[in-house]
Amino acid sequence: MTFLIVLQVLIFAALMLHTVHLMPAFNRCLRNAESALDAGYLGAMLTIRLARNVLGLILVTASTAPNPDIHALVGKGIALFLALTAVNVILTHYRRRNQAEGIRF
């Protein structure tokens, strides 16, 4: 049992380290509209990734639960995980497109 707890903490730490590289988004100076929009994209991406990683941690623990009712929810959790991943991909695409083309208001 202790091994599973340690493994879950290691998985959670790895998921959080994956998201830490987006933290400078909150420290950016918002001098113009372009940097404000870029910081907004980075903030939204950070929030989506944190939500996705927390959901992943919940799914790891739910998949080992002895209750069959919880196992029935794992499929919906995986679908939500994939939806959050798709939202992150869309945000990344729009951010890169705005960097390449410039912002049009």
Image: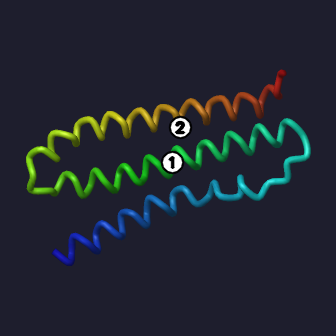
Q: Which residue is mark 2?
A: 88
User: Vertical placement of 86 versus 35: above or below?
Assistant: above
Residue at 15%, 56% (x, y): give it. Answer: 65
Mark 2 crowdedness (10 Å alpha carbons): few <14, some 14-19, many ≥20: some
User: Vertical placement of 37 versus 64: above or below?
Assistant: above
Which element carries disc 1, helix, strand or loop? helix
Q: Is residue 42 left or right of residue 68?
A: right
* Quadrant, the C terminus: top right
- The one nearer the camera, 104 or 96, is 104
Mark 1 crowdedness (10 Å alpha carbons): few <14, some 14-19, many ≥20: many
For the rendered model, the colour scheme is rainbow
Residue 32 found in image quarter: top right
* Quadrant, the N terminus: bottom left
Residue at 74%, 45% (x, y): give it. Answer: 39
Q: Is residue 18 left or right of residue 71?
A: right
Residue 15 found in image quarter: bottom left
Could you say where residue 76 lies in the image, as x and y percent from the top left? 27, 35
Could you say where residue 42 lies in the image, as x and y percent from the top left? 67, 45
Residue at 37%, 49% (x, y): give it. Answer: 55
Query: Mark 1 or mark 2: which comes first in sequence?
Result: 1
Q: Amino acid at mark 2?
A: Asn
Residue at 72%, 55% (x, y): give it. Answer: 26
Which element carries disc 2, helix, strand or loop? helix
Q: Which residue is mark 1?
A: 49
